[in-house]
Amino acid sequence: MHLVFAYIDPGAGSLVIQAIIAGLVSIPFFFRNAIRKTFGRLRNKPTDGASAATGSSASDDKGAAISDSE
């Protein structure tokens, strides 16, 4: 019978736990563009044309104001 004494001191244990947590937290930041595209497709929103998505017609309003003042 061989006795095995496995010991991890508190400093090393907390370092391992901190590395695991940091790895799990960094995954969404690393893949954030892929996550945004996936959720955008699930919500059926267009990924391009930001003004079309917000409903802004600022460029049309400027053209109308210029033609009205002439």
Image (cartoon, rainbow, N blue to C red):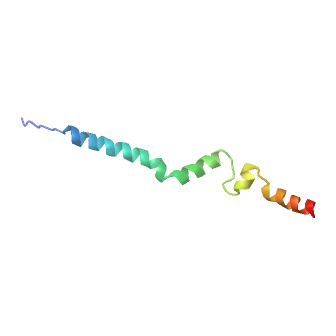
Give the residue at x 58% y 50%: 36
Q: Front-most of 65 and 48?
A: 65
**Which residue is outermost to the bottom?**
70
Query: Going by the image, does 13 lie left or right of 49?
Result: left
Q: Which quadrant of the figure contains the C terminus?
A: bottom right
Question: On screen, 57 above or below 3?
Answer: below
Farthest residue, direction front? 69
Front residue of 54 and 40: 54
Q: Position of residue 64 (x, y in %)?
A: 88, 59
**Drawn side of residue 29 relative to residue 9, left or right:** right
The residue depicted at 32 percent of the width and 46 percent of the height is 19
Going 83% across and 59% down the picture, which residue do you hit? 62
Task: List the single residue furthest toward the left.
Answer: 1
> In the visual, does 67 lie left or right of 26?
right
Q: Position of residue 40 (x, y in %)?
A: 63, 48
Which quarter of the image is occupied by the N terminus?
Answer: top left
Can you give x and y, in whole percent of width and height, for residue 29 in the image? Answer: 48, 50
Q: Position of residue 32 (x, y in %)?
A: 52, 51
Q: Nearer the viewer, residue 20 or 2?
A: 20
Pick the residue in front: 36 or 67.
67
Q: Is residue 63 above or below residue 44?
A: below
2 lies left or right of 43: left
Number of numbered discs overlaid on the protein picture: 0
